[in-house]
Each structure stands twice: as C-alpha cells, then as structure tokens.
Image (tube, grey):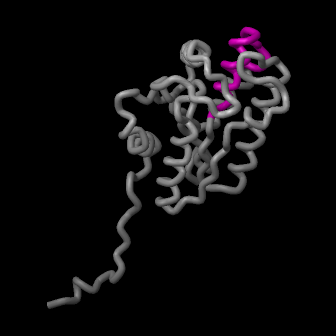
Amino acid sequence: MLGRGGPLKVAFIGTHGVGKTTLCFDLASRLKRLDLSVDIVKEVARDCPLPINQETNYEAQAWILHSQCAREIASCYRFQAVVCDRAVIDNYAYLVHRMGRREELERFVREWTKTYDGLFKVPVWRPPLYDGTRDVNPSFQREIDALLDRILEEMDIHHVRLQRKEREGWIPLILRELGLPEEPPQIELFPGELADEP
C-alpha cells in the first residue's frame, strides 16, 4: 500500500499546453526505476466525442470528468502507482469557464480531489503549441490557468505549485513531496563477502 489505503495516485494539473504529458512520462519512468508497476491515465478530453476547448458544453465536460474518474479507478485496481495527465479539478475549471459554477458537480469534485496523494500544479511557461486537438489561443490558456488557481484557493484544495524557473528540479521535488527516494536503493550483490575478509 503506497497511497491512501491503496495505490499511489498522482496528478499533474494546470491549463493546456504547459507540458503535463511530458511530466507524466518523466515521473512514470522514475517510479518504474523504484520497482513500482505504473500506469498513466492520459488526457481523456482527446477522446471526447463532444465539443471541447472554448466550444465545450455541460455534457462534454460531464463526459470528460466521469471518464477521468472511471479510468483512474481501473488503473488503481491494476497498478501500484498511477500518474494522471490532469485531474477532475482541471475538467471542472473548463466547465466553469464556459458555464459558471455548478454546485452538483462541485461537491463531487471536492470529494474526488481527496483521492489523490499528490496534486502538482504546472505553471504557464510557454504558449500552447498546435497538436491537432487543444486550443492555441494564449489568452484562453491564461484564463484557464487563472481560473484554476481561483478554484483551488476557494475550494481549499491542497496542491504543490511547481515554479516556472525550476523546471529541471520538478521531478526530484515531486518524489520528495511523495516521500519517495530519488534513486532506487543500491542492492548489495554479494552480501557479507567483504565482512568475511581478514
């Protein structure tokens, strides 16, 4: 048992185009080096059959939010560690941007965020790049980032804010925050051999 009574579950949160996917793979690689079975819950919005980005609607964001939860549940059932590219709080921020706060979803989101062992907020450090799915409007990117910050504060959701100027140290910082070693322990190949020498 690594996390809160079960597998370790970590999520990178933040607006689109800030490198969360790359961080997911970097962290998953380090966790595998610690001899953990790891899965990545990829961004579910890319599979949504309904409008996303600035054209999203209630049904689309509900689909994304509940699909995210379902994939997290399935991964946590099979792996020791799960790294999520986004969390339910991100999905909720896009909904709020388009349609305003929704009490029925906000209660659910508030409770679900308690299932993460670590939420790491990735700052905006570059404009969004075209990837065929996500919006490339820098203003929209910044609006979501600011809205997410406000929701995190108002809902009093514990998270760690990664600092833009310290990108090289993000993964070691995350491992420390999770109480994990930065490197796998050294295994003694020939235990006791040196002790037996005269």
Please identify the dominant SS of the magenta region.
Answer: helix
Query: Residue at (72%, 53%) from the top-left corner?
Result: 77
Is any part of residue 143 visible from this angle? yes
Query: Residue at (53%, 26%) from the top-left corner?
Result: 158
Spot occupied by residue 18 in the image (x, y as percentages of width and height): 53, 29
Is any part of residue 155 visible from this angle? no
Q: Is residue 34 magenta?
A: no
In this rendering, the answer to whether 150 lies above or below 173 is above
Q: Is residue 89 magenta?
A: yes
In this rendering, the answer to whether 83 lies above or below 55 is below
* Rendering quarter of residue 55: top right
Magenta span of residues = 86-106
Spot occupied by residue 63 in the image (x, y as percentages of width and height): 82, 30
Q: Tell whether 55 sits left or right of 27.
A: right
* Rendering quarter of residue 113: top right
In this rendering, the answer to whether 89 lies above or below 186 is above
Query: Residue at (64%, 37%) from the top-left corner?
Result: 115
Q: How many marks?
A: 0
Q: Between 121 and 166, which is closer to the camera in this rendering? A: 166
Q: Between 108 and 33, which is closer to the camera in this rendering? A: 33
* Rendering quarter of residue 119: top right
